[in-house]
Image (spheres, rainbow, N blue to C red):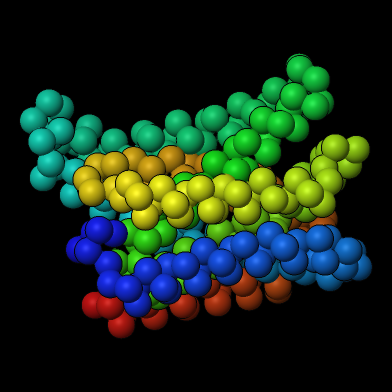
Amino acid sequence: MTAMDMTAMEWTIAVGLAMTLVVVHLVAPRIARLPGLAQQRLASVGGGVAVAYVFVQLLPELAAGGRSLTELPIADFAPTPIVESGLFLIALVGMLVIYSLDVVSDSGHGSSRWLYRVHMTVFALINTIYAYTMPSLLTTGIDYAALFTVAIAAHVLLVDRTLARAHPDLFRHEDRWIGILGVVVGFVFAAAFPPVEELTLAVTTALLGGGLLMTTFREELPVASKARLLWLIGGAAAMTALILGAVALGG
């Protein structure tokens, strides 16, 4: 089943999940005003959630998606091992794009305003890709879509915190509407132009996965001196248990 075959109830659930991410954007300023210890604990929990999602859900999805690509016409033009590795190569591109932006930012090339706009654009694109792929993910199970939303929500809160610290003179409350706009645009595109081809959905998911891989290890894992280890392990354990539970029930 594809997004085109979704029922009215499934579209309602998809709208609810997208609105959940919008709410996360709206409450981000309140999270940013919490005391330092509370923010460190939340960052550790979010980092644990993100790492668990990457290793227990995202990477296995890329591997399974690569195997499924061998059944598509694209397999006629390349050896099977290369086709199976294709999604990982696309994820690598997504990761390197995010990393390149960070390197340019740290090296001082370009104006801070330009770099800020680039970071906000990438942030909006991640929200857009999430919203575009989420209705199709919902067809595989509500639990998977919900956990995907939780992982992206943790990412949103942590990147919001990072942007506020990296660009204190530029980041404003109103700028958070850019992320919300990304969610709306992605969802509208998913409704109007659903990814009817498996390859389209796989490529967009892999690009999003590459971006999440980089931001998870560069931004969402707290610095060791500021990490709250038990909170990080707790977040990772909770997300792992939820994913494995969804797999067990789905199987």
In the image, 36 versus 16, the foreground residue is 16
Give the quarter of the image for residue 243.
Answer: bottom left
Tell me where residue 117 appears, x and y as whole percent: 71, 31
Q: Quadrant of residue 230?
A: bottom right
Q: For the view shown, which residue lies furthest in the top direction?
A: 109
The residue sitting at 75% across, 32% down in the picture is 116
Q: Is residue 31 above or below residue 100?
A: below
Looking at the image, residue 83 lies above or below residue 181: above
Q: Is residue 3 visible?
A: yes
- Horizontal arrangement in the rendering, residue 183 relative to residue 165 (left or right): left
Q: Residue at x 41, y 59 (%)?
A: 134
71 vs 229: above or below? above
Q: Position of residue 79 (x, y in %)?
A: 14, 30
In the rendering, at what x and y percent does residue 170 appear? 85, 37
Identify the image quadrant of the C terminus.
bottom left
- Left or right of residue 208, residue 19 in this image: right
| Residue at left offset 29%, top offset 36% | 86
Location of the N terminus by quadrant is bottom left
Kindly identify the residue that appears in the image at 21 percent across and 35 percent down. 83
Which quarter of the picture shows residue 99? top right
